[in-house]
Amino acid sequence: MHTRYPRGQSVIRLHDVSPLTWDACQEWIELGRLLSLPPMDLFVIPRHEGGPLDHGAGLPRDFVNRLKELQALGHRLWVHGWTHRGEETEDEFAGLDAVHAADRARRALNDWKAAGLPDPDGFCPPCWRMTKQALPAIARLGFPEIDLRFGVWSPAGFRLSPALSSWGGNLIMASLWDRSLVRQDRLLRMSRLPRRVVLHPQDLDGAARSSLETILDRMSNDLSG
Ligand SMILES: [Zn+2]
């Protein structure tokens, strides 16, 4: 299914997919389908519902089946952190040294395999925050690609790829940023760099929704034109 996103072209990535956010995720996936966009990549949080100490946590079977169905339709599945939760904020991997970062990524992979999901297409640290030292340690776990703030790492090297993403939160800066996304998209189009359009479940309720919908609509027009 890789061929639907030829190298150098833009991709759509839906972050924070989990049983907790599923309803909103489904809305974005449906919108993509209505606009005839290529299947978006799904960034799944293996243990969103519990923390590291929650031994009963795991991905429900019907959720896993749904992910497998979507994979069969061409959606690539990525591991997006383990719990997505850090000490106080959402950037689970920020500030972790290589050993602790690799340990969390390994646990994420264990949960992933225990749920019966197919080998993941890659890994993305929550909020793209991770120390430089953690990258080689996580790469050794065998992820084909690692999605980072400014591009995508793979054993073949680093590919520069700007990300268009909402700011999050309700601060004035966030809403200014979110409203500027369409303009950012226009500039990136002119640069011809392969961009990553990033969606979050919470964008459906935020200031970024309208901007992101406009961007998706334009992508759809590009593909049909
Ligand atoms: Zn996230």
Image (cartoon, rainbow, N blue to C red):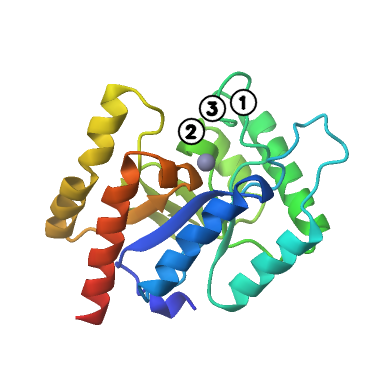
**Residue type, mark 1 in image:** Gly
Q: Is residue 169 above or below residue 32?
A: above
Instruction: Examine the image and state in which quarter residue 156 appears.
Output: bottom left
Q: Calculate the distance from the C-alpha at mark 1 to the C-alpha at mark 3.
A: 8 Å
* Crowding near the residue tagged with mark 1, few <14, some 14–19, many ≥20 C-alpha atoms within 10 Å: some
**Whether label 1 touches label 3, CB < 8 Å:** yes
**Callout 2 secondary element:** loop
* Crowding near the residue tagged with mark 3, few <14, some 14–19, many ≥20 C-alpha atoms within 10 Å: some
* Crowding near the residue tagged with mark 2, few <14, some 14–19, many ≥20 C-alpha atoms within 10 Å: some
**Residue type, mark 2 in image:** Arg
Mark toward the viewer: 1 or 3: 1
Does residue 59 appear left or right of residue 81 in this picture? right
**Residue at x-position 79% and y-position 55%:** 60
Q: Calculate the distance from the C-alpha at mark 1 to the C-alpha at mark 2.
A: 11 Å
**Whether label 3 touches label 2, CB < 8 Å:** yes
**Residue type, mark 3 in image:** Ala
Q: Say which residue label 2 marks.
A: 129
Does residue 3 appear left or right of residue 88 in this picture? left
Depth check: give the residue in front, 210 or 77: 210
Mark toward the viewer: 1 or 2: 1
Q: Calculate the distance from the C-alpha at mark 3 to the C-alpha at mark 2.
A: 5 Å
Q: Nearer the N terminus, badge 3 or badge 2?
A: 3
Label at residue 94:
3
Label at residue 86:
1
